Image (spheres, grey):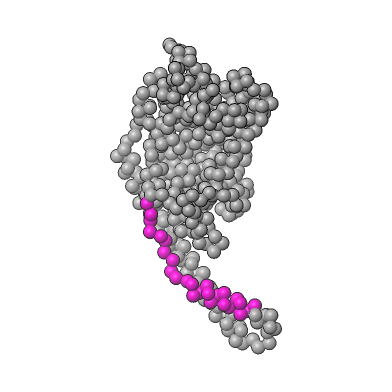
Amino acid sequence: MRVGIPRVLNLYSTAPFFRTYFETLGLQKQNIVFSDVTSEGMWQEGAKYGSVDPCFPSKVAQAHVHNLLFSHHDPAGKRLEVIFFPSLTHVPNFVTDTVDDASCPIVAGTPNVLKAAFTKEVDFFAQRGTRYLDPALSFAEPLLLARGMFEALGALLEVTEDESDHACRQGLLALAAFDADLQRRGRAVLDTVEAENRIALLVLSRPYHGDPGLNHGIPEEFQALGYPILSIRSIPKDRTYLERYFQQSPAQSDPLALSGVWPENYSANSAQKVWGATFAARHPNVAVLDLSSFKCGHDAPTYGLIDTILQTARTPTAALHDIDANKPGGSIKIRVKTYAHSLRLHQERVEDEAARRQELSHRVAVKELELLERARANTKDLSELDAARLGESIEALRQRVASYHPRRGPEQETGLVRLGRRRADGTVERFGANTTIAAE
């Protein structure tokens, strides 16, 4: 059996669950087929079945279903027995105190609308010999999620409810492992930019804006200029790590909470965007690229809130809230170059502050060394043990003072940034090309 899944909307954040579910129940990985990445050609070819909504991510979903039906499905050869496009009413959320973890209703309803679009005049699914499944599923209630998966797929896959439940548990474990891997990679980026006094760019967006056809390649433009890209999902969620930045916030005692900043947070993806802004506002090496689709109703209430958070912290920010099917190449290049100039100025400020901190630390060490040497010269009755300890302290300070040299930030590199893990002494251990970023 081959199963097709559209590469759209909240499947960008939940696909590891569904892939693992199918693989656990016996499907080969090559038989789980995702539609292609959004492109202008795909959009023009497949966007002729009626508009879903002014929201481009929802509109483009019809092109992905068309791509599965007419590019990945061959009725006489490699068939797609099923196109699986679940209606996700609630999605996973790491923010701990949201009122609800709901999906955008337009996004949640798109699978049902597309079913009507592809069957209204001609039933393309029946014509092409495939089935279209769009069950309503909620990640907020794992038991109901498992029940919904069994009701939708149990008979088709010829599995028992226990087998289906086991596959759901494996899917949730795979989703957690995927998140953990992303966070390790995000930690490597953050450690690198902190140690080198550089700037990373956090993209505040919904998960599906990771599609190059939706973000128009804007994050890649900044990556090519030497600014490592972070997603909200890649920020480490380890509380010990986060408390370094959130410990001074009386309004936000839990670093993964949001009610102190935004009490009425019903949308999971919108809440994560606001939380990402609170993290960027506290991290000196993180700037923000805020992406949102044209007329996004769920993002609109967050615009002013995010802007206030970032402006108060003086965090560099560029906001593009009008992304649509049209790609104004000239306008995008101008905005990228303008913001890149602001980022360069900000990085120079970060480098200057780091140099001043290093110089101050050096002066303190010089003074401390002077006082210890004076104390040793004026003190005659030290025990042998105390004298040895004092000598060790003096020698360590001498080495520290001798090793000092005014520190400058590295020349701005372009292209891919080589990551590393920060050592205790502040230097960076570089990862090789084939290094696996393992858990600590």
Residue for point 43% across, 39% down: 291
State the residue at coordinates (41%, 55%).
Answer: 346
Q: Does the stretch in magenta take in 64?
A: no
* Residue 287 position within the rendered picture, expressed as x and y whole percent measured from the top left: 45, 49
399 in the magenta segment? yes
Above or below, 55 against 438 in this view is above
Which of these two is toward me, 17 or 232?
17
Q: Is residue 299 visible?
A: no
The residue at the point 44 percent across, 49 percent down is 228
Q: Which residue lies furthest to the top in this view?
A: 121
Q: Does 232 appear above or below 117?
A: below
Residue that sits furthest to the front in the current view: 77
Which is more toward the observer, 221 or 275? 221
From the viewer's perspective, tell me whether residue 185 is left or right of residue 346: right
Q: Is residue 401 above or below residue 106?
A: below
Q: Quadrant of the N terminus?
A: top right
Q: Quadrant of residue 42?
A: top left
Report the residue at 58% width, 44% height from top.
180
Q: Which residues, given as a range, are shown in magenta?
A: 389-414
Left/right placement of residue 69 relative to residue 159 reads left
Left or right, 386 with respect to 231, comes to: right
Q: Position of residue 421 (x, y in %)?
A: 52, 55
Across and down, in percent, residue 43 comes to 38, 27
Q: Find residue 262 and report its horizontal and vertical position in percent.
A: 56, 40
How many numbered badges does the structure rendering display? 0
